[in-house]
Amino acid sequence: MMMDDVDEYWRRVFAFSPFTVWFNLTGQPAIVLPLGRSGTGLPVAVQLVARAGDEGTLFRLASRLETARPWLDRRPALAA
């Protein structure tokens, strides 16, 4: 998003990604994983955040969650 209007830039950033932008700004490691489904079959996700510089813990936890609840082959009907 290359634009001269800084206010519009940040409005778009927060509109598109309101929960991840804070971690992008601070440099904290964070990850969003789809772990369930809504009643209509759409993915429901969880956002995990680790201490600054502790990506290893975050990746290990994400790996364990993905092993326990694999999602690669689960797609909502509208994406099939």
Image (cartoon, helix red, strand yellow):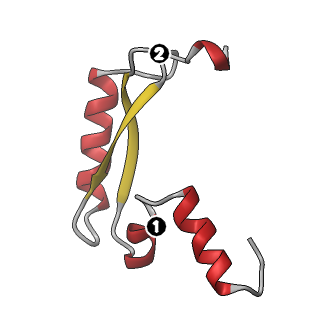
Determine which of the numbered discs, if any, sits on residue 37 in the image. none
The disc labelled 2 sits on which kind of residue?
A: Gly
Figure quadrant of residue 33: top left
Query: Which residue carries the number 2 mark?
Result: 41
Q: Quadrant of the N terminus?
A: bottom right
The residue located at (56%, 17%) in the rendering is 76
Taking 67 as reference, is 60 above or below it? below
Figure quadrant of residue 30: bottom left
Secondary structure under badge 1? helix
The residue located at (58%, 57%) in the rendering is 16
Taking 50 as reference, is 78 above or below it? above
Sequence-earlier tag: 2 or 1: 1
Mark 2–mark 1 Cα distance, whole angstroms, equals 27 Å
Q: Quadrant of the C terminus?
A: top right
The disc labelled 1 sits on which kind of residue?
A: Val
Secondary structure under badge 2? loop
Query: Which residue carries the number 1 mark?
Result: 21
Left or right, 24 with reference to 78: left
Residue 35, horizontal then vertical, whole percent: 34, 28
The residue located at (39%, 21%) in the rendering is 38
Q: Residues within 10 Å of mark 1 (few under 14, many from 20)?
A: some
Residue 64, horizontal then vertical, whole percent: 26, 33
